[in-house]
Image (spheres, helix red, strand yellow):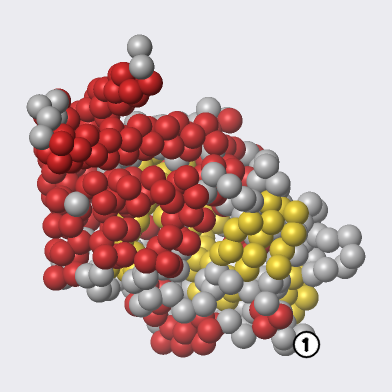
Amino acid sequence: MTYLTIAYWIWGATCCAALVQGVLLGLHTWEHRRFARRRIRDPRPVDQTRRVALLSPCKGLDLQLESNLLHLLRQDYQNYEVLFIVESDTDPAWEVIQRLIQRESQVPARIIIAGRALETGQKIHNLATATAQLGSDVEILAFVDSDVCPEPDWLARLVNRLSRPDSGAITGYRWFVPIRPTLANCLLYSINASIAALLGAGGQSIVWGGSWAIRRSDFESLGIRESWQGTISDDLVATRAVQAARLPIEFEPACMTESPMDYSLLGLGSFLRRQHMIGRIYAPRIWYQSLCLMIASTVAVFGAIGLLTGSLILAENWSRWAACFLVTWYALQVYRGWLRHGLARVYVQNWTKCTAWAAVFDVWAAPFSLLYNTLAMCAACFGSRIVWRGITYDLDRQGRLMRVLQPATSLPIAGRQLRYDLPEPFSHASDRASMERETRLPTRDTPRR
């Protein structure tokens, strides 16, 4: 048996695996669409007596930041407060937040200055700082990123699913909305839509840090704040803690959030590599399984394209299997893309021409999205240095932070904050302290429609 024959049989096996994967993912995407439509059309009465702390860590000026944060202050939930957390009041987001909470007086809101993170990721440090000083009346913690735009009923839907005593954590996800119909934006839209469609019913999801909630009692009993120490991933670390306690993590389609984005090809590559590196470090088993499946599909598809091209050039008659595989595989991808197009109409409220272009690209350009995402995953196999919002983190193999490299401009302004010491294990031995400034506004007296 020649090497060529061996390679041919290996390629045939990858083709079979790719087709089986395509069929299963198609069925799962169809089920996701059915589940999402049913959940979104069937709202349940919400118990609004439980006090909720909504935490939003902010850094820099995200796209449409003011609009995103404004939606947090206009949620259809009557008993919550918003905690905006920044590193310092020199952060550009500070002025935006300050202006918003002065203008929107219906909801109690405050700004917390966490200070520079020295032994953990900045986002982790912000969240640890805020969760360590909540009021005694807070029963539920909800987390949201500053680059997403939740619907008015987002918080109520998120909290409502925690009413059952056996629930662990409730999570949403993001649906990227491109600002411009560029190739990079269309690629990211397609890759992210494919990932979003993997979520579904049941309690086997993973937490996404930009849209999730947990009971405060569970948050503290599971030691999530302690688990965060020395890491940079809030959601995957929280996922491990909840799963270790054998509590379900449920996906709520009504908590899918729109996330405006605009990337260059270079910026997209950096973003995907960072996301995949975080997955490789903090969820290695799932990530390596995904990598193997992606490589198998890529080898099958582009091997078939090469085989078909070679047979046409050489005028040989051994291309029919490659052609049959490509037609079948591509038909399955188009079907999945069509299902995701239907999902986009469900999740995206402000449908634009840019979103329409990206959705069409998602339907017809599956080979390009597959290749780009596979290359990004392969690039993430190497290295342990991650650059996130201008801060460089060096990690070990277990995801523990070894070194933080920050620009000097991120230091808080001394003498303009109130000092407080965090309880162990977050207090630093060398008298490093976080600082806080709060702006409190009166609670609203009448409910908002």
In this view, the residue farthest toward the top is 1
- Judging by the rendered image, the residue that carries numbered circle 1 is 415
Left or right: 257 as drawn, with respect to 217: left
Q: Which of 334/108 is in front?
A: 334
- Residue under the point 27% across and 35% down: 303
State whether residue 40 is above or below residue 284.
Answer: below
Q: Secondary structure at mark 1?
A: loop
**Residue 178: percent from left, percent from top:** 27, 68
Split into 4 quadrants, where in the image is the N terminus? top left
Split into 4 quadrants, where in the image is the C terminus? bottom left
Q: Is any atom of residue 311 visible in this view?
A: yes
Q: Which of 109/375 is in front?
A: 375
Circle count? 1
Task: State the image quarter where residue 137 is shown.
Answer: bottom right
- Residue under the point 50% across and 50% down: 379
**Residue 122: percent from left, percent from top:** 63, 64
Q: Which of 309/93 is in front?
A: 309
Q: What crowding class fits label 1: few (fewer than 14 Cα within 10 Å), some (14-19), or many (20 or more)? A: few
- Residue under the point 12% across and 30% down: 316
- Residue under the point 59% across and 38% down: 241
In this view, the residue farthest toward the front is 314
**Residue 376: percent from left, percent from top:** 43, 51
State whether residue 108 is above or below residue 308.
Answer: below
Task: State the image quarter where residue 211 is shown.
Answer: bottom left
Q: Is any atom of residue 220 visible in this view?
A: no
**Residue 194: percent from left, percent from top:** 28, 46
State whether residue 244 is above or below residue 209.
Answer: above
Q: Amino acid at mark 1?
A: Gly
Q: Which of 388/437 is in front?
A: 388
